[in-house]
Amino acid sequence: MTIIIHHANENQGTDIKANKNQPLSHADYPRDSIDWLTRLIGFDTVSRHSNLALIEDVQAYCEQLGLTVDLTFNEAKNKANLFVTVPAGKNADEVNHGLVLSGHTDVVPVDGQDWSSEPFTATIRGNKLYGRGACDMKGFVACALNLLPQAVKLSNAGQLRRPLHLALSFDEEVGCLGAPLLLADLKARDITPDYCIVGEPTNMAMVVAHKGIAVYRCRVHGKSAHSSLTAQGVNAISYASRLISYVDTLAEEISQRDDNDGMFDVPYSTLSVGTIQGGTATNIVPNLCEFTFDYRNLPHMTQDDIVAPIEAKVAELSAQMQARAADTGIELQQLEAVPAMTDSDSAELQALIAALTGDDERHKVAYATEGGQFTNSGIPTIICGPGSIEQAHKADEYVELSEIKRCDGFLQKLLGSCTVATADK
Protein backbone atom coordinates (compact mmCIF):
# COMPACT_ATOMS: atom_id res chain seq x y z
CA MET A 1 0.00 0.00 0.00
CA THR A 2 1.20 3.50 -0.67
CA ILE A 3 0.32 6.76 1.00
CA ILE A 4 0.09 9.88 -1.12
CA ILE A 5 0.33 13.45 0.09
CA HIS A 6 -0.52 16.34 -2.19
CA HIS A 7 1.54 19.41 -1.29
CA ALA A 8 0.20 22.45 -3.12
CA ASN A 9 -2.99 24.42 -3.58
CA GLU A 10 -6.54 23.08 -3.29
CA ASN A 11 -6.57 21.66 -6.82
CA GLN A 12 -3.22 20.13 -7.59
CA GLY A 13 0.03 19.04 -5.98
CA THR A 14 3.08 16.83 -5.90
CA ASP A 15 2.78 13.25 -4.69
CA ILE A 16 5.05 11.98 -1.94
CA LYS A 17 4.78 8.24 -1.50
CA ALA A 18 5.70 6.22 1.59
CA ASN A 19 5.71 2.43 1.46
CA LYS A 20 3.60 0.96 4.29
CA ASN A 21 3.88 -2.69 3.34
CA GLN A 22 6.94 -3.38 5.47
CA PRO A 23 7.12 -3.38 9.29
CA LEU A 24 8.58 -0.24 10.80
CA SER A 25 12.32 -0.08 11.39
CA HIS A 26 14.21 2.71 13.11
CA ALA A 27 15.03 4.20 9.73
CA ASP A 28 11.37 4.13 8.74
CA TYR A 29 9.98 5.92 11.79
CA PRO A 30 7.62 8.70 10.75
CA ARG A 31 9.43 12.01 11.17
CA ASP A 32 6.61 13.94 12.79
CA SER A 33 2.90 13.88 13.61
CA ILE A 34 1.87 14.59 10.01
CA ASP A 35 3.85 11.56 8.85
CA TRP A 36 2.22 9.48 11.58
CA LEU A 37 -1.25 10.67 10.64
CA THR A 38 -0.52 9.91 7.01
CA ARG A 39 0.49 6.39 7.96
CA LEU A 40 -2.51 5.80 10.22
CA ILE A 41 -5.06 6.97 7.66
CA GLY A 42 -3.63 4.38 5.26
CA PHE A 43 -5.07 1.62 7.45
CA ASP A 44 -8.74 0.98 6.63
CA THR A 45 -10.01 0.55 10.17
CA VAL A 46 -13.72 0.98 9.51
CA SER A 47 -15.44 -0.68 12.47
CA ARG A 48 -16.71 -3.63 10.45
CA HIS A 49 -13.07 -4.49 9.61
CA SER A 50 -10.17 -5.67 11.75
CA ASN A 51 -7.83 -3.09 13.27
CA LEU A 52 -5.00 -5.55 13.81
CA ALA A 53 -2.76 -4.26 10.99
CA LEU A 54 -2.68 -0.82 12.59
CA ILE A 55 -2.27 -2.22 16.11
CA GLU A 56 0.59 -4.50 15.05
CA ASP A 57 2.30 -1.58 13.33
CA VAL A 58 2.10 0.54 16.48
CA GLN A 59 3.14 -2.43 18.60
CA ALA A 60 6.30 -2.93 16.54
CA TYR A 61 7.13 0.77 16.86
CA CYS A 62 6.68 0.74 20.63
CA GLU A 63 8.73 -2.41 21.07
CA GLN A 64 11.57 -0.91 19.07
CA LEU A 65 11.50 1.97 21.55
CA GLY A 66 12.04 -0.62 24.29
CA LEU A 67 8.46 -0.54 25.61
CA THR A 68 6.29 -3.46 26.64
CA VAL A 69 2.94 -3.60 24.86
CA ASP A 70 -0.20 -5.23 26.23
CA LEU A 71 -3.06 -6.21 23.94
CA THR A 72 -6.64 -7.14 24.82
CA PHE A 73 -8.66 -8.85 22.10
CA ASN A 74 -12.31 -9.15 21.24
CA GLU A 75 -13.90 -12.59 21.33
CA ALA A 76 -13.23 -13.20 17.63
CA LYS A 77 -9.55 -12.22 18.07
CA ASN A 78 -9.72 -9.99 15.00
CA LYS A 79 -9.59 -6.71 16.91
CA ALA A 80 -7.41 -5.52 19.76
CA ASN A 81 -6.86 -2.71 22.21
CA LEU A 82 -3.29 -1.60 22.84
CA PHE A 83 -1.91 -0.29 26.11
CA VAL A 84 1.70 0.76 26.54
CA THR A 85 3.50 2.53 29.37
CA VAL A 86 6.55 4.74 29.37
CA PRO A 87 7.68 4.09 32.94
CA ALA A 88 8.66 6.77 35.39
CA GLY A 89 12.26 7.17 36.46
CA LYS A 90 13.74 4.94 39.16
CA ASN A 91 13.35 7.56 41.89
CA ALA A 92 9.86 8.65 40.86
CA ASP A 93 7.11 8.88 43.45
CA GLU A 94 4.57 7.03 41.33
CA VAL A 95 4.69 3.58 39.75
CA ASN A 96 1.26 2.35 38.62
CA HIS A 97 -0.41 5.75 38.36
CA GLY A 98 0.43 8.35 35.74
CA LEU A 99 -1.41 9.93 32.84
CA VAL A 100 -3.26 8.17 30.00
CA LEU A 101 -3.48 9.51 26.45
CA SER A 102 -6.46 7.69 24.96
CA GLY A 103 -7.72 7.32 21.41
CA HIS A 104 -9.79 4.92 19.33
CA THR A 105 -8.45 3.31 16.17
CA ASP A 106 -11.71 2.60 14.33
CA VAL A 107 -13.40 4.99 11.92
CA VAL A 108 -16.88 5.25 10.40
CA PRO A 109 -17.64 3.94 6.88
CA VAL A 110 -17.29 5.97 3.70
CA ASP A 111 -20.07 4.11 1.86
CA GLY A 112 -22.29 6.40 -0.17
CA GLN A 113 -20.15 9.47 0.50
CA ASP A 114 -18.80 11.62 -2.33
CA TRP A 115 -15.10 12.15 -1.57
CA SER A 116 -12.88 14.49 -3.58
CA SER A 117 -9.87 12.23 -2.92
CA GLU A 118 -9.21 8.67 -1.81
CA PRO A 119 -10.49 8.49 1.81
CA PHE A 120 -7.80 6.07 2.98
CA THR A 121 -4.98 8.06 1.41
CA ALA A 122 -3.93 11.14 3.35
CA THR A 123 -4.12 14.16 1.06
CA ILE A 124 -2.95 17.67 1.89
CA ARG A 125 -4.65 20.50 0.06
CA GLY A 126 -3.81 23.98 1.25
CA ASN A 127 -3.67 23.97 5.07
CA LYS A 128 -5.85 20.89 5.54
CA LEU A 129 -5.12 17.17 5.65
CA TYR A 130 -7.98 15.06 4.28
CA GLY A 131 -8.74 11.41 4.96
CA ARG A 132 -11.07 9.18 6.92
CA GLY A 133 -10.12 9.55 10.57
CA ALA A 134 -8.08 12.72 10.03
CA CYS A 135 -9.91 14.44 12.88
CA ASP A 136 -11.88 11.54 14.41
CA MET A 137 -9.49 10.67 15.78
CA LYS A 138 -6.23 9.55 14.25
CA GLY A 139 -4.88 13.10 14.45
CA PHE A 140 -4.55 12.87 18.22
CA VAL A 141 -3.20 9.31 18.05
CA ALA A 142 -0.53 10.52 15.61
CA CYS A 143 0.55 13.29 17.97
CA ALA A 144 0.69 10.87 20.89
CA LEU A 145 2.82 8.40 18.94
CA ASN A 146 5.13 11.21 17.89
CA LEU A 147 5.62 12.09 21.57
CA LEU A 148 6.71 8.61 22.66
CA PRO A 149 10.43 8.77 21.73
CA GLN A 150 10.91 11.93 23.77
CA ALA A 151 9.05 10.41 26.70
CA VAL A 152 11.24 7.30 26.50
CA LYS A 153 14.37 9.46 26.47
CA LEU A 154 13.23 11.28 29.62
CA SER A 155 12.35 7.98 31.27
CA ASN A 156 15.76 6.50 30.49
CA ALA A 157 17.40 9.59 31.94
CA GLY A 158 15.39 9.22 35.15
CA GLN A 159 13.57 12.50 34.56
CA LEU A 160 10.02 11.23 34.12
CA ARG A 161 8.22 11.79 37.42
CA ARG A 162 5.07 9.85 36.56
CA PRO A 163 4.33 7.16 33.96
CA LEU A 164 2.90 8.13 30.60
CA HIS A 165 0.41 5.63 29.17
CA LEU A 166 -1.00 5.30 25.66
CA ALA A 167 -4.34 3.51 25.25
CA LEU A 168 -5.71 2.66 21.81
CA SER A 169 -9.12 1.00 21.55
CA PHE A 170 -11.32 -0.71 18.98
CA ASP A 171 -15.02 -0.26 18.15
CA GLU A 172 -15.61 3.13 19.75
CA GLU A 173 -17.80 4.11 16.81
CA VAL A 174 -20.21 1.20 17.31
CA GLY A 175 -20.94 1.51 21.02
CA CYS A 176 -17.55 1.95 22.75
CA LEU A 177 -17.08 -1.82 22.87
CA GLY A 178 -13.31 -2.04 23.24
CA ALA A 179 -12.59 0.35 26.11
CA PRO A 180 -14.35 -1.73 28.82
CA LEU A 181 -12.07 -4.68 28.03
CA LEU A 182 -9.01 -2.43 28.25
CA LEU A 183 -10.13 -0.94 31.55
CA ALA A 184 -10.89 -4.37 33.01
CA ASP A 185 -7.39 -5.46 32.06
CA LEU A 186 -5.87 -2.42 33.80
CA LYS A 187 -7.86 -3.18 36.94
CA ALA A 188 -6.68 -6.79 36.91
CA ARG A 189 -3.08 -5.55 36.63
CA ASP A 190 -3.57 -3.01 39.45
CA ILE A 191 -2.86 -0.05 37.17
CA THR A 192 -4.77 2.99 38.43
CA PRO A 193 -3.95 6.06 36.33
CA ASP A 194 -4.36 9.46 37.96
CA TYR A 195 -5.77 11.14 34.87
CA CYS A 196 -6.88 10.49 31.32
CA ILE A 197 -7.05 12.74 28.27
CA VAL A 198 -9.26 11.44 25.46
CA GLY A 199 -8.19 13.14 22.23
CA GLU A 200 -11.54 13.41 20.44
CA PRO A 201 -11.73 16.52 18.23
CA THR A 202 -12.49 19.64 20.30
CA ASN A 203 -10.36 22.25 18.47
CA MET A 204 -8.01 21.78 21.44
CA ALA A 205 -10.63 23.21 23.80
CA MET A 206 -11.19 21.52 27.16
CA VAL A 207 -14.36 19.43 27.37
CA VAL A 208 -15.02 18.45 30.98
CA ALA A 209 -18.29 16.52 30.65
CA HIS A 210 -20.50 14.90 28.05
CA LYS A 211 -23.83 13.17 27.88
CA GLY A 212 -24.38 9.45 27.94
CA ILE A 213 -26.19 7.61 25.20
CA ALA A 214 -28.50 4.61 25.24
CA VAL A 215 -30.09 3.13 22.12
CA TYR A 216 -33.28 1.06 22.24
CA ARG A 217 -35.22 -1.05 19.77
CA CYS A 218 -38.97 -1.48 20.17
CA ARG A 219 -40.83 -4.34 18.45
CA VAL A 220 -44.61 -4.18 18.34
CA HIS A 221 -46.19 -7.56 17.58
CA GLY A 222 -49.76 -7.26 16.31
CA LYS A 223 -52.14 -9.57 14.43
CA SER A 224 -52.71 -9.55 10.69
CA ALA A 225 -56.13 -9.28 9.10
CA HIS A 226 -57.64 -8.01 5.88
CA SER A 227 -57.94 -4.23 6.02
CA SER A 228 -61.70 -4.53 5.49
CA LEU A 229 -61.90 -6.54 8.72
CA THR A 230 -59.84 -4.38 11.06
CA ALA A 231 -61.68 -5.59 14.17
CA GLN A 232 -60.19 -9.04 13.60
CA GLY A 233 -56.62 -7.72 13.70
CA VAL A 234 -54.34 -5.75 16.00
CA ASN A 235 -52.58 -2.98 14.11
CA ALA A 236 -48.89 -3.01 15.09
CA ILE A 237 -48.21 0.33 13.37
CA SER A 238 -51.06 2.03 15.20
CA TYR A 239 -49.83 0.85 18.59
CA ALA A 240 -46.26 1.75 17.68
CA SER A 241 -47.43 5.25 16.81
CA ARG A 242 -49.05 5.57 20.25
CA LEU A 243 -45.79 4.62 21.92
CA ILE A 244 -43.81 6.98 19.68
CA SER A 245 -46.21 9.77 20.60
CA TYR A 246 -45.55 9.01 24.26
CA VAL A 247 -41.78 9.07 23.68
CA ASP A 248 -42.15 12.50 22.08
CA THR A 249 -44.25 13.72 25.03
CA LEU A 250 -41.66 12.41 27.47
CA ALA A 251 -38.90 14.14 25.47
CA GLU A 252 -40.73 17.44 25.86
CA GLU A 253 -41.17 16.88 29.59
CA ILE A 254 -37.50 16.18 30.28
CA SER A 255 -36.48 19.21 28.22
CA GLN A 256 -38.37 21.38 30.74
CA ARG A 257 -36.84 19.98 33.94
CA ASP A 258 -35.55 22.40 36.55
CA ASP A 259 -32.18 20.62 36.84
CA ASN A 260 -31.05 21.06 33.22
CA ASP A 261 -27.47 22.23 32.68
CA GLY A 262 -26.90 25.40 30.65
CA MET A 263 -23.19 24.59 30.15
CA PHE A 264 -24.12 21.89 27.64
CA ASP A 265 -24.56 22.85 24.00
CA VAL A 266 -27.98 21.16 24.30
CA PRO A 267 -28.82 21.88 27.94
CA TYR A 268 -31.28 19.03 28.52
CA SER A 269 -31.48 15.28 28.03
CA THR A 270 -32.98 14.26 24.71
CA LEU A 271 -35.10 11.43 23.32
CA SER A 272 -35.28 10.91 19.57
CA VAL A 273 -36.93 8.25 17.39
CA GLY A 274 -34.51 7.43 14.59
CA THR A 275 -35.86 4.58 12.46
CA ILE A 276 -39.19 2.85 11.84
CA GLN A 277 -40.39 0.04 9.61
CA GLY A 278 -43.49 -2.08 9.42
CA GLY A 279 -46.34 -3.40 7.32
CA THR A 280 -46.41 -5.39 4.09
CA ALA A 281 -49.32 -3.93 2.09
CA THR A 282 -51.94 -1.22 2.47
CA ASN A 283 -54.78 -3.76 2.50
CA ILE A 284 -53.27 -5.83 5.32
CA VAL A 285 -53.49 -4.92 9.01
CA PRO A 286 -49.77 -5.01 9.95
CA ASN A 287 -48.61 -7.61 12.44
CA LEU A 288 -45.19 -6.10 13.07
CA CYS A 289 -43.72 -2.64 13.48
CA GLU A 290 -40.22 -1.90 14.72
CA PHE A 291 -38.61 1.41 15.63
CA THR A 292 -35.48 2.61 17.39
CA PHE A 293 -34.81 5.61 19.57
CA ASP A 294 -31.90 7.04 21.47
CA TYR A 295 -31.61 8.76 24.83
CA ARG A 296 -28.80 11.22 25.49
CA ASN A 297 -28.73 11.95 29.17
CA LEU A 298 -27.11 14.65 31.21
CA PRO A 299 -24.55 13.13 33.63
CA HIS A 300 -26.79 13.53 36.69
CA MET A 301 -29.66 11.67 35.01
CA THR A 302 -29.90 7.92 34.46
CA GLN A 303 -31.60 5.55 32.07
CA ASP A 304 -34.25 4.90 34.74
CA ASP A 305 -35.49 8.46 34.25
CA ILE A 306 -36.95 7.43 30.89
CA VAL A 307 -36.95 3.63 30.89
CA ALA A 308 -39.30 3.28 33.86
CA PRO A 309 -42.06 5.48 32.38
CA ILE A 310 -41.62 3.97 28.91
CA GLU A 311 -41.84 0.45 30.33
CA ALA A 312 -45.03 1.45 32.15
CA LYS A 313 -46.48 2.72 28.85
CA VAL A 314 -45.37 -0.49 27.11
CA ALA A 315 -47.20 -2.53 29.74
CA GLU A 316 -50.34 -0.40 29.35
CA LEU A 317 -50.39 -0.72 25.54
CA SER A 318 -49.52 -4.42 25.62
CA ALA A 319 -52.48 -5.08 27.92
CA GLN A 320 -54.78 -3.29 25.48
CA MET A 321 -53.42 -5.36 22.60
CA GLN A 322 -53.64 -8.67 24.45
CA ALA A 323 -57.23 -7.97 25.38
CA ARG A 324 -57.91 -8.29 21.64
CA ALA A 325 -55.44 -11.09 20.80
CA ALA A 326 -53.37 -13.07 23.26
CA ASP A 327 -50.20 -13.44 21.16
CA THR A 328 -49.60 -9.72 20.75
CA GLY A 329 -47.56 -7.22 22.71
CA ILE A 330 -44.49 -4.98 22.74
CA GLU A 331 -40.81 -5.79 23.30
CA LEU A 332 -38.26 -3.19 24.43
CA GLN A 333 -34.60 -4.06 23.94
CA GLN A 334 -31.51 -2.02 24.75
CA LEU A 335 -28.92 -2.09 21.94
CA GLU A 336 -26.20 0.27 23.19
CA ALA A 337 -25.22 2.03 26.40
CA VAL A 338 -22.35 4.50 26.76
CA PRO A 339 -22.08 6.27 30.11
CA ALA A 340 -21.92 10.02 30.52
CA MET A 341 -18.63 11.66 31.50
CA THR A 342 -18.82 13.73 34.65
CA ASP A 343 -16.60 16.58 35.82
CA SER A 344 -17.05 15.79 39.53
CA ASP A 345 -13.53 14.41 40.12
CA SER A 346 -11.42 16.19 37.50
CA ALA A 347 -10.81 19.61 39.10
CA GLU A 348 -7.04 19.04 39.43
CA LEU A 349 -6.77 17.82 35.85
CA GLN A 350 -8.82 20.75 34.60
CA ALA A 351 -6.54 23.17 36.43
CA LEU A 352 -3.49 21.52 34.88
CA ILE A 353 -4.94 21.68 31.36
CA ALA A 354 -5.98 25.32 31.83
CA ALA A 355 -2.48 26.21 32.98
CA LEU A 356 -0.85 24.43 30.03
CA THR A 357 -3.18 25.88 27.40
CA GLY A 358 -3.71 29.31 28.88
CA ASP A 359 -7.45 28.79 28.37
CA ASP A 360 -9.60 28.45 31.47
CA GLU A 361 -12.88 27.91 29.61
CA ARG A 362 -14.70 24.63 30.23
CA HIS A 363 -17.14 23.02 27.78
CA LYS A 364 -19.79 20.31 28.01
CA VAL A 365 -21.09 18.50 24.92
CA ALA A 366 -23.96 16.32 23.74
CA TYR A 367 -21.91 13.67 21.91
CA ALA A 368 -20.53 10.66 23.78
CA THR A 369 -16.96 9.31 23.96
CA GLU A 370 -15.02 6.68 25.89
CA GLY A 371 -14.44 9.35 28.54
CA GLY A 372 -17.49 8.18 30.48
CA GLN A 373 -16.06 4.69 30.75
CA PHE A 374 -12.82 6.10 32.18
CA THR A 375 -14.65 8.26 34.74
CA ASN A 376 -16.85 5.29 35.67
CA SER A 377 -13.62 3.43 36.41
CA GLY A 378 -12.53 6.17 38.79
CA ILE A 379 -10.10 7.91 36.43
CA PRO A 380 -10.64 11.69 36.20
CA THR A 381 -10.89 12.51 32.49
CA ILE A 382 -11.18 15.42 30.11
CA ILE A 383 -11.61 15.52 26.32
CA CYS A 384 -9.13 17.57 24.30
CA GLY A 385 -7.92 16.94 20.79
CA PRO A 386 -7.19 18.45 17.37
CA GLY A 387 -9.86 19.11 14.75
CA SER A 388 -13.55 19.93 14.84
CA ILE A 389 -16.34 17.49 15.62
CA GLU A 390 -18.23 19.20 12.79
CA GLN A 391 -15.86 17.49 10.31
CA ALA A 392 -16.26 14.02 11.80
CA HIS A 393 -18.10 11.30 9.85
CA LYS A 394 -18.45 13.46 6.73
CA ALA A 395 -17.11 13.10 3.20
CA ASP A 396 -13.80 14.94 2.82
CA GLU A 397 -13.14 14.71 6.55
CA TYR A 398 -10.13 16.86 7.37
CA VAL A 399 -8.01 18.32 10.11
CA GLU A 400 -6.25 21.65 9.78
CA LEU A 401 -2.47 21.34 9.94
CA SER A 402 -2.42 24.13 12.52
CA GLU A 403 -4.53 21.94 14.82
CA ILE A 404 -1.93 19.16 14.66
CA LYS A 405 0.76 21.72 15.50
CA ARG A 406 -1.30 22.98 18.46
CA CYS A 407 -1.79 19.41 19.70
CA ASP A 408 1.95 18.74 19.42
CA GLY A 409 2.67 21.85 21.46
CA PHE A 410 0.08 20.90 24.08
CA LEU A 411 1.48 17.38 24.49
CA GLN A 412 5.00 18.77 24.79
CA LYS A 413 3.86 20.95 27.68
CA LEU A 414 1.96 18.04 29.19
CA LEU A 415 5.07 15.88 29.06
CA GLY A 416 7.03 18.71 30.65
CA SER A 417 4.55 18.73 33.55
CA CYS A 418 5.44 15.08 34.16
CA THR A 419 9.18 15.62 34.44
CA VAL A 420 11.32 15.87 37.54
CA ALA A 421 12.66 19.25 36.41
CA THR A 422 9.14 20.70 36.34
CA ALA A 423 8.31 19.21 39.71
CA ASP A 424 11.42 20.70 41.29
CA LYS A 425 10.80 24.26 40.12
Image: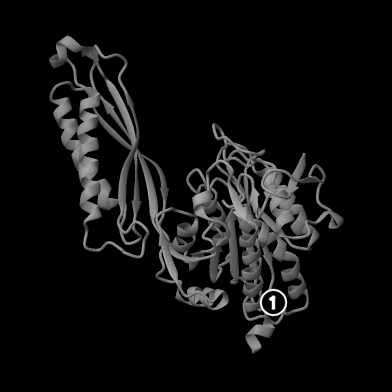
Residue 315 at least partly seen: yes
Q: Quadrant of the N terminus?
A: top right
Q: Quadrant of residue 264?
A: bottom left
Would residue 373 be found to the left or right of residue 1 on screen? left
In this figure, which residue is indicated by the disc labeled 1? Answer: 160
Residue 175 position, x and y percent, is 47, 45
Would residue 272 be found to the left or right of residue 150 on screen? left
> On screen, 91 above or below 316?
below
Residue farthest along the right direction in this orientation: 27
Indicate the secondary structure of the residue bearing disc 1: loop
> On screen, 82 above or below 235?
below
> On screen, 361 above or below 201?
below
Q: Quadrant of residue 132?
A: top right
Q: Residue at x 66, y 62 (%)?
A: 144
User: Which colouring convention does the figure follow?
Assistant: one colour
Q: Which residue occupies the foreground of this view, 127 or 268? A: 127
Q: Quadrant of the C terminus?
A: bottom right
Residue 378 position, x and y percent, is 47, 66
Q: Residue at x 62, y 73 (%)?
A: 414
> On screen, 405 above or below 48?
below
Residue farthest along the bottom direction in this orientation: 425
Q: Residue at x 56, y 51 (%)?
A: 136
Residue 38 position, x and y percent, is 71, 50
Q: Residue at x 28, y 51 (%)?
A: 304
Q: Amino acid at mark 1?
A: Leu
- Label 1, residues with CA under 10 Å away: few <14, some 14-19, many ≥20: many
Residue 311 at least partly seen: no
